[in-house]
Image (tube, coloured by chain):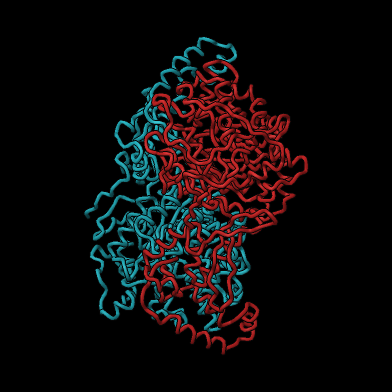
Chain colours: A cyan, B red
Amino acid sequence: MRTHALQEVHPQHRLNAITDGDISVPVTAISLADSLDGSPNDDVLLYRTAGPGSDPEMGLPPLRSEWIAGRGDVETYAGRAPELADDGRSAVRRGKASQSWRGESRPPLRSAEGATVTQMHYARRGEITPEMRFVALREGCSPELVRDEVAAGRAIIPANVNHPESEPMIIGRAFLTKINANIGNSAVTSSIAEEVEKLTWATRWGADTVMDLSTGDDIHTTREWILRNSPVPIGTVPIYQALEKVDGDAAALTWEVFRDTVIEQCEQGVDYMTIHAGVRLAFVPMTANRVTGIVSRGGSIMAGWCLAHHEESFLYTHFDELCEIFARYDVAFSLGDGLRPGSIADANDEAQLAELKTLGELTQRAWAHDVQVMVEGPGHVPLHLVKENVDLEQDWCHGAPFYTLGPLVTDIAPGYDHITSAIGAATIAQHGTAMLCYVTPKEHLGLPNRDDVKTGVITYKIAAHAADLAKGHPGARVRDDALSKARFEFRWHDQFALSLDPETAMAFHDETLPAEPAKTAHFCSMCGPKFCSMRISQDIRDAFGSAQEQRDAIEAGLAAKSRQFVELGSSVYVSDEIAEVAR
Amino acid sequence: MRTHALQEVHPQHRLNAITDGDISVPVTAISLADSLDGSPNDDVLLYRTAGPGSDPEMGLPPLRSEWIAGRGDVETYAGRAPELADDGRSAVRRGKASQSWRGESRPPLRSAEGATVTQMHYARRGEITPEMRFVALREGCSPELVRDEVAAGRAIIPANVNHPESEPMIIGRAFLTKINANIGNSAVTSSIAEEVEKLTWATRWGADTVMDLSTGDDIHTTREWILRNSPVPIGTVPIYQALEKVDGDAAALTWEVFRDTVIEQCEQGVDYMTIHAGVRLAFVPMTANRVTGIVSRGGSIMAGWCLAHHEESFLYTHFDELCEIFARYDVAFSLGDGLRPGSIADANDEAQLAELKTLGELTQRAWAHDVQVMVEGPGHVPLHLVKENVDLEQDWCHGAPFYTLGPLVTDIAPGYDHITSAIGAATIAQHGTAMLCYVTPKEHLGLPNRDDVKTGVITYKIAAHAADLAKGHPGARVRDDALSKARFEFRWHDQFALSLDPETAMAFHDETLPAEPAKTAHFCSMCGPKFCSMRISQDIRDAFGSAQEQRDAIEAGLAAKSRQFVELGSSVYVSDEIAEVAR
């Protein structure tokens, strides 16, 4: 199979691997220049979500196929017969889907009769799977920790047996904070190729999982292309596709249509699915006096269905059947927060908390089937109420990983909601949220384009990393320290290479001081060569040696040292070229 | 005097005023459309920092002159004789400053012999000044609260008697969180007119104070133009100008040169000055083993001076003389954190905390002279160590207002440090920091341009407002609630008008759905007309009335209501035009 090399984000980055026996985990290695004193600087190895790169028409190699087959607990089967309606109403009109998948097609797998093939099932039996070993290498922890956290339900490894291309990753508070990027087609503007490109783009900048929220045409075929090319787990909201199958009429939805859609997606390889089973009939009236009602699309579909039929949600009443299906493929639940607050005014209200309690009950029901679960959270929450969300979730949902959308800490900044939500996201992750769903600058206003996807991913890498630093995650500070050391030593190229977004950092630098010599100069573009506090600090260090030597010098009143600095100082300040502002 | 109308940020914004007797405070009034049910929506009144607008060549009217004169405790005097060196080395070479100030020049004021003219002095005597009444109207609190907080040193009103153009504002944890924007000339790229334009631009987007950090040519004259046009307090770091006067040789600085520079700036009307008097000789060695040494420019100047002379800092030894000077003009101290950490690795270390303790001692020395004080803080701090900074500052500095630069919660995102720092800024403000110094996307990389200044200000308005919501500041939620209500009712123009950045919000909306009808349509650009969760919520409310009515309906199993919703639902879902993605 051909694979195209993925474009690295900086010339000093290269694809490398860390191995443990037969397990090999791709990492990004960043090579660094020597320090001024000639001492070398070790490569910095980064967690890599972009995979090895693929030819979109061929897809990725099935990394996990042997591991799955090796367990001897799956069977291939004919699978559900495809229908034109799987690709939406215009496929029905046209009589065919467009751009059908041309790469390898494998028959679907499911558990052999009576077997359960979830990572939670293996973990609870005490087994350490190759997936767990892969995850442990990625996270720099023991495989036993991975197994124990998965067994306890405090972490999940989304890993559908029909998505063998995915590199195993873990979502749980004991591990690195993860981020999700949403993509999905638009009937107006987007082609299948564009969706694959968005997937690759999002993982290149660091998305740990991707949700395909397509609702337009060719929804089945688009998902096929995405899954076959995705090195990260793929999530969906199957009610969106189900709604398409009933011509957009929520009241016409049935358990049977929904179940059929779920099985269709299980067979394709979707790793986790958002299921809004907590939107119960009795909770819907609790939203009537909200400032912003129900803002979740899945939540409002189910609320509309419950009211139209005056019945309990079919997702709730059929939940155990869903668990049985998920257990056969190892699909994880992402229990949707259909009643999440859509404004500061509605945060932590009766409707939201009633649903959260129900999600805790559903978590236990899923765990009874050894099905992995994470729980979704808000939304819009003022900063002082953020921690309560994760505390209640951890308590009521028995430690299941929390997966939140921001939250946005104010409503007044449309156009900047990546920032309003990054503040809430960093805070909620600091307190134990395991995965953050990104928000782009277009939130509330329009469809994210390529730049918005990148901005959303980078912003959420910041929030997640800030939380990892705050949680004292082992190794999290390596990159900060390497970058700050490079900054202090004026190794500009290393500073760019260690940045989350090297291109932007270099472009901003070059706006002020574009010439190549400025990237090796011992000053920066804010203060210019005339005056530089960092250089003075270095001169202090050079002139006075270690802290103890400096203390000794001060105590001894060493006039000679002072004179030495005066001489040095003269050379520091004589250049007179650019004078700039900096506090 | 001619004044030019300031361009408002949105057509629905207009300059208005709230008055109390003879005190009139400018506010921005946002007019809103009626709700769908015909009920009107009140104007939203916003705190306004932009002033009434000025002709740059004429300056603003001296709003406070009568109040100052009315107290009968100031005298005019000849003032310090201007020198060419005040405008830097190239003015000395040329023999003149460029673009001298052409508007009105008033002789400088200072306290009459034996008098103290600080707001703290008046407050401690139990007086409520017009400045305090103005502030109380702006903040929506009682004048007594303002007086008591100023008297206790927990808040400051920076208000040099020589800057009568400034509209009084207050910095303290009991009040709205404020933000500062840094501007300042660059010998390479910036003219005086450009600096005035940057000032106006920064206040238009909401900067509460502006620091002029000029170090280039025409430093005195640039400051004159800025002060005469500034409706907000102006801060400076006088050591920058003093360094220019000694040809950039830190070792050549003397107390006399520094004092002369401070008096020059007091006479011009600078409202607060950053003084790095906490960088004591004994603390300098504590920085030698840091990852990033000393990153404050003022801090490194003073560290260099201390070491070169092997003497205690002249700022520390002459601090009481500085207090005597400041008391004659009502200049506030901004006690500089010259040893702030420049990286995550250096956060909350020995050097930083030793300086902070000293700032607490200096605070009490300033208060003994009735001089107002705020204390500067970091910098780079991981999220879990942020709160400790404000807790220690409040404790060691006896409740003096804290004024921090971010802090940045990670070092790995140059190009996005407005975001890394907004996370820290919102958190530290939530815990009691009174003012936040903005950070632009160019931090660490280059000089902010006009767009960067705007991005920095908007980002910091978000952080400050998020903190005000979290602190439960009375009235803070009005704007959030009005915007969310407009969003829920699809009043797009109102949503834009209520945004921090209406232009950007509208531009992002129009990228996806540009036509004017889309701004009155009852759906938005994410989901399109086919499916809209917000509309379903409204339909639920319309169909079922209040929460109690809905509960009653559910309990009664009211089939008719269900049928009604089904009929309604049909009309909701039939339109088939655009299908878009949203979680």
Q: Is residue B199 left or right of residue A234?
A: right
Q: Is residue A319 visible?
A: no
Taking depth in this image into account, of B123 and A557 the one nearest to the observer is B123
**Residue pictured at 38% horizontal, 61% vertical:** A448
Q: Which residue is depicted at the point 62% across and 32% down?
A: B356
Residue A341: name its quadrant.
Answer: bottom right
Rendered view: A567 above or below A25: above
Quarter location, residue B556 = bottom right
Residue B317 placement, left or right of B309: right
Q: Is residue A291 above or below residue A1?
A: below
Residue at (56%, 45%) from the top-left corner? Answer: B232
Q: Give percent across and percent down for residue A1.
A: 22, 55
Q: Is residue A565 visible to the viewer in this orientation of the structure?
A: yes
Q: Looking at the image, which residue sits at the far bottom? A: B560
Image: A211 above or below B282: below
Location of residue B125 by image quarter: top right
Tell me residue A83's x, y (percent): 31, 77
